[in-house]
Image (cartoon, grey):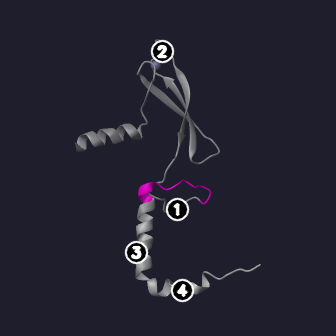
């Protein structure tokens, strides 16, 4: 089972794409865009003479699984559900620890604004 996982990871790291027409391996060329979380890919079927399919694809970063230790302030990638839950649980834990200091009298919050 560990072996299978390793193979799968290896395939992911090489970004293997198969031709949708003939199933051959496709060569991947990336092109830079001005967006840090989006990239365009140019795919060429390696079965060049019998198939010859070429296409453009996109690679977009859609979700943060583990946040960066040095986040780019210009990059805003939404957090995955699991990560959001972790952050919420952590916040709840911290609130419980420091509840005496944080809690303020509730009266101030519901101040009435009369016009
Ligand atoms: Zn092909």
Q: Identify the residue position indicated by label 1 in the image.
A: 70
Q: Position of residue 17 (x, y in %)?
A: 44, 30
Residue 115 is at least partly visible in this image: yes
Mark 3 within 8 Å of ligand 1, using the beta carbon: no
Give the class, few, some or many, for how many residues have Cα within 10 Å of label 1's Cα (few <14, many ≥20): few
Residue 75 drawn in magenta: yes
Q: Earlier in the sequence, mark 1 or mark 2?
A: 2
Whether residue 65 can be seen here: no
Looking at the image, tell me whether mark 1 or mark 4 is earlier in sequence order: 1
Within 8 Å of ligand 1, the CB of disc 2? yes
Mark with earlier residue (2, 4)? 2
Q: Earlier in the sequence, mark 3 or mark 4?
A: 3
- Numbered tag placed on residue 4 in the rendering: none
**Quadrant of residue 30 within the rendered picture:** top right
Q: What residue is disc 2 on?
A: 51
Q: Which residues are magenta?
A: 73-83
Q: Which residue is mark 4?
A: 104
Q: How many marks?
A: 4
Residue corresponding to mark 3: 93
Quote the CA–CA distance across marks 2 and 3. 58 Å
State the CA–CA distance, disc 1 to disc 2: 44 Å
**Front position in the image: 86 or 71:** 86
Q: Position of residue 39 (x, y in %)?
A: 57, 40
Query: Ligand 1 closer than 8 Å to the CB at disc 4?
Result: no
Q: CA distance from mark 3 to mark 4?
A: 18 Å
The answer to whether marks 2 and 4 mark residues whose Cβ atoms lie closer than 8 Å is: no
Disc 2 crowd rating (10 Å Cα; few below 14, some 14-19, many 20+) is: some
As displayed, is residue 42 above or below residue 87? above
């Amino acid at each position: 089972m560990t072996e299978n996982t390793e193979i799968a990871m290896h395939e992911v790291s090489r970004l293997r794409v198969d031709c949708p027409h003939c199933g051959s391996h496709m060569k991947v060329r990336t092109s830079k865009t001005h967006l840090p979380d989006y990239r365009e890919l140019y795919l060429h079927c390696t079965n060049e003479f019998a198939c010859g399919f070429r296409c453009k694809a996109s690679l977009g970063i859609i979700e943060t699984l583990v946040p960066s230790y040095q986040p780019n302030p210009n990059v805003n990638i939404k957090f995955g559900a699991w990560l959001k839950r972790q952050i919420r649980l952590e916040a709840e834990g911290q609130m419980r620890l420091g509840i005496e200091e944080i809690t303020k009298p509730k009266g101030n919050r519901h101040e009435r604004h009369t016009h």
